[in-house]
Structure formats: structure tokens, C-alpha cells
Image: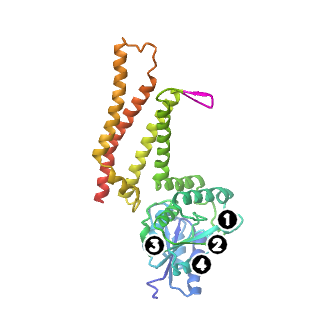
Amino acid sequence: MAAADPEVSVIIPCLNERTTIGLCVAKARGAFTRLGMAGEVVVADNGSTDGSREVAAAAGARVILEERKGYGSALLAGFAQAKGRYLVMGDADDTYDFTDLDGFVRPLHSGFDVVMGDRLHGKVEPGAMPWHHRHIGVPILSFVLNRLFGAKIRDAHCGMRSITREAYAKLKLRTTGMEFASEMLIRAARARLRIAQIPIVLHKGGRPGRPHLRSFRDGWRHLKMMFMLSPTHLFLIPGLALFATGAALLALLAAGPIHVAGRLVDYHFMILGSLMAVLGFNVTTIGLFARIYALVEGLEEDDPLLPRLFKVFNLERGLLAGGAAFLAGLAIESSILVEWLRKDFSFGGEIRVRPAILGLTLMVIGAQAFFASFFFSMLGTERRRG
């Protein structure tokens, strides 16, 4: 294979890594020679001011400049410029061993689409990873990612990984910060790519000063992006649970108070049920909007729920359902008003709280359903155009 057409591209994002970037480039190039593979090292510099670009170039890397700040921005630029069939990414601080390229390339030869390094089941040198990252942050974020997306990744935030060019093209990655690492795995899991995991050694590295990673800020960015890419867990499941619980309370208490374990449960819990039902309906509709928006904006390629929903739902049916609920509630409230007027502005000591709560709840949910149907139809039309 000609040098202009490398088999492997090693992409290294870099921001002020003068003390270690040259060593990382040299290790990768040495691995190419030892393994007899044609390769290149692409250093995506993110605005270094310490001479890192010059050091990387002198060590034999092809250096590109990405002015947009962020770990993801640098990697996106590096991937775009890489020429290899197999793409390997790793940090520039010498914490990952670029001499071990064979472990990240061989599984791709065998049919895997992605290879993930696994620090937690490999070896972490003393001082290489803060204890709260190793025992709290990484396990929790990996658990959330696996729970939401079924990825089954042991160390979801390892920065050294590889991917075939064909698989990378399918992912259509776009995040610009540290959450790029999670986005890659989320999209890989959804695309049902074959993912291999190999134990690796995490070295202490040689970067002086404060690390680029900010534990809580970047951890929150990972978590936020996971939930944004999973509107079912963020909106639909909590929303439906709230709505169902609220509707059950309304139904149980509409006829009168009940006793539970010897305790009186009265209309106060009916008020709570009303609030829960309205809130749950709002959250559920937002979840549906989010799922359509994800399709329109290309955040998702497919959604198994929406085609079935569109078969039974259209604007007219939504307007009829919302209008019927509103009118039913209005009828209840009107009957209460008429009774109040007929009894000379008094109910004569009779409490009319229960029907009033039920009527108001139906009016609010009906009005929301009426207007939400328009927005739902607008988003659906945009989706069909796309």
C-alpha cells in the first residue's frame, strides 16, 4: 500500500501538549514500522500556543489546525482529514500507549466495527486516574449509557479506541466537547455495530499542570447528552407514569373519599392527582415532539414508535379528542355554575370540589391536546418532507 494511501490513521487531538505530543507521534510511527503497516499520524491541533504543532510536525505527524474549540471539534476535524481505512484515536498526554496499535487494528481486520480500550479491566497506574473517576464517575456514566442504549460497554469513557472508516461514516457524529466519546458509542449501539473491548494500561502520562478534563462539568455534559438522545427515558416514561398515577387518583376519588389502611384519603389527593395528570400529559407530549425533532434534525435515523403513531393519529383526530375533553370539562364546570346561580350564589353547604377538580383537569388537558395536535402535525409534516 502506498504511503499516500495509508491503511491506518492515528488521530490525536492536541491542545498545548508540547512535552508529550512528540513522544506519542514517535510511538505510533514506531508501531507502524514494527507491524509492517502503512500508516499516518494526524494531529488535530485545537489552538496550541506552546509550540505543540511544531513538535508534532518534527516528529513526523501531519498537523491540521481546528479553530473551533473542544475535544469533539478537534477529533471531527482529524477524522475528516484522515486517509486510512482504520481510524485510531487517542489522547496527546502519553496516558495511552500508541505502541499497542495492533490490539486496536487486528479486531477490525476480523470483522469488528469498533474497538474500545478498557482501563477498568486492564491496569491503571498509580496517579493515572483520580479515584472518583475510577470508582464513581466512569462506572456510573457507563451504567447509564448501557442502561439507556444497551451498549454493554465496560469502560464507556476510555479515550483510546478505533473504528473502520465505513462505520465512522454511518455515525454522523456532531458533538464538539468531551461528550463526543459518549455520542460515538450511543450511535454505534443504535447502528448495531460490532464492538470489541480490549484491556489496556492507562499510564500516568507526562502532561504538566492541570488536566483538560473538568470532572463535574464534563461529566454533566456526558449525562445531559445521553438523556437528550433518549427522549423515551427522559420524557415519555416519566410523563406516562405521572399521567397514569394522576388519572388513577382522579378516578378513585371522583365519587367520594376512600379509606386506605384506616386513613382517610380525601379531595386533597384529588388535587394532587389533577396536577400529576396535567404535568404528565405535558411531559409526554414534549417527549413525542422530541422524538420527531430528533428525526427531522438527523439525530436519529429511525423511530419504531412514530410510524405506528402516525397511522392512528392525525390532526383532525387530535383536535376532536382535545375538543371533546375540553367540552366535557366545560360541561361539568357549567353545571356547577348554573347550580350556584340557582341557589342564590350558594351551594347550601354541599361541597362541589370533586366535580370542579375533574372538570378543570379535563379542560386543561383538552386545551393542551388541541394545540399540541397542531404542533405534532407540523413536526410530522416536516419529517415527511425530510
Q: Position of residue 282 (x, y in %)?
A: 42, 41
Q: Which residue is mark 4?
A: 103
Q: CA distance from mark 2 to mark 4?
A: 9 Å
Whether the magenta-drawn stretch holds residue 123 is answered as no
Whether the magenta-drawn stretch holds residue 264 is answered as yes
Q: Position of residue 217 (x, y in %)?
A: 56, 52
SS at mark 1 in the image: loop
| Mark closest to the chain's N terminus, 3 or 2 | 3
Q: Tell me which amino acid carries mark 2.
A: Ile
Q: CA distance from mark 4 to mark 3?
A: 18 Å
Q: Which residue is mark 3?
A: 167
Q: CA distance from mark 3 to mark 2?
A: 23 Å
From the viewer's perspective, is 233 left or right of 31?
Answer: left
Q: Which residue is mark 1?
A: 128
Q: CA distance from mark 1 to mark 2?
A: 13 Å
SS at mark 2 in the image: strand
Q: Which residue is mark 2?
A: 200
Magenta-drawn segment: 258-265
From the viewer's perspective, is 138 left or right of 57?
Answer: right
